[in-house]
Image (tube, rainbow, N blue to C red):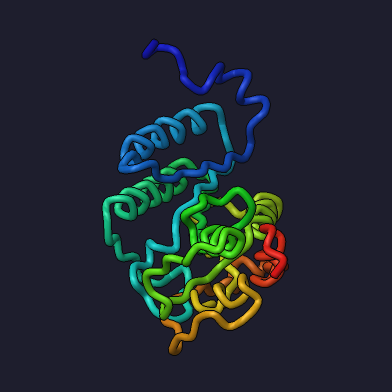
């Protein structure tokens, strides 16, 4: 019912929760209702005395930027999803300011790894290699900052363990390197199958999170192998 907290008994939860990581994504156009749920969740967590809320945003908050991007770079909401994320980020920042809590916003770059959706670039290329299909790539001249999922998990763990100051914090989580789509294809196939000009895109300035003792460990070549590609 409306009178029953959807997250459980507050007194019992308060004994167990100090830090919370919320992972907000998109299913179709369903992100806006998720924002409303997140607001309810933030309120609930405040009521039980949660010290830290960590929420995942997206590198696309930076729009179609170019080059190395720091956390202080301008935010350019280019669609409804990014506008909703930005609104949620601003809300969390104000909650942290008013209530004296830790609100941490993570801008994840191109996370890849096992069980990634099949239409994503690397799983698609691996599938095409194994089945003999022709890869479908929209633009071979773009580049992204690819970061392996295990590195992302370790980055989040480092933030939980070591980011102890109260207030609002933003961290980029990426590998810190621009890698072209053509280079990815060549790594998957183990030979040069695509040629492209100088790749264009943006990549994470990760100097801030490195101060917490974290650095990415898995190279793109190693990550592709971990995903079952042995070319």
Image point (39%, 36%), residue name: 39
Question: In this picture, is 103 found above or below 59?
Answer: above
Instruction: Please tell me which residue is depicted at 50% across the width and 78% down the height of the picture.
Output: 182
- The answer to whether residue 6 is left or right of residue 162 is left
Q: In which quarter of the image is residue 228?
A: bottom right
Q: Residue furthest left?
A: 79
Task: Examine the rendered structure and indicate whether residue 5 appears above or below residue 22.
Answer: above
**Is residue 39 something that shows in the picture?**
yes
| Residue drawn at x 42%, y 36% as measured from the top left | 38
Relative horizontal placement of residue 54, taking residue 219 as reference (left or right): left
Q: Residue 205's spot in the image, x, y percent?
A: 53, 74
Residue depicted at 46% across the width and 18% down the height = 5
Position of the N terminus by quadrant: top left
Front-lying residue, 63 or 12: 63
User: Residue 185, how many percent across, how many down?
Assistant: 55, 73
Q: Residue furthest bottom?
A: 197
Split into 4 quadrants, where in the image is the C terminus? bottom right
Q: Where is residue 181 in the image (x, y as percent from the top left)?
A: 49, 74
Q: Where is residue 54 in the image (x, y as percent from the top left)?
A: 54, 47
Q: In this view, does 54 lie to the left or right of 164?
A: left
Answer whether residue 178 is visible to the viewer in this image: no
- Closer to us: 127 or 15: 127
């Amino acid at each position: 019912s409306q009178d029953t907290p959807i997250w459980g008994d507050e007194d019992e939860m308060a004994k167990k929760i100090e830090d919370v990581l919320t992972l907000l994504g998109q299913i179709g156009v369903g992100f806006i209702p998720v924002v409303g749920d997140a607001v309810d969740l933030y309120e609930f967590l405040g009521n039980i005395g949660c010290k830290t809320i960590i929420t995942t945003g997206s590198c696309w908050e930076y729009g179609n930027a170019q080059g190395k991007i720091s956390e202080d770079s301008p935010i350019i909401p280019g669609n409804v999803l990014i506008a909703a994320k930005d609104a949620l980020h601003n809300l969390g920042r104000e909650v942290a300011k008013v209530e004296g809590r830790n609100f941490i916003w993570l801008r994840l770059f191109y996370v890849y790894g096992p069980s990634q959706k099949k239409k994503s670039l690397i799983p698609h290329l691996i599938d095409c290699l194994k089945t003999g299909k022709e890869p479908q790539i929209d633009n071979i001249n773009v580049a992204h900052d690819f970061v392996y999922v295990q590195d992302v998990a370790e980055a989040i763990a480092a933030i939980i363990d070591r980011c102890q100051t109260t207030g609002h914090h933003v961290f980029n989580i990426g590998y810190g390197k621009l890698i072209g789509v053509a280079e990815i294809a060549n790594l998957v196939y183990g030979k040069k199958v695509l040629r492209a000009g100088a790749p264009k895109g943006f990549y994470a300035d990760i100097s801030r999170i490195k101060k917490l003792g974290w650095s990415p460990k898995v190279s793109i070549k190693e990550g592709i192998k971990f995903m079952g590609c042995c070319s």
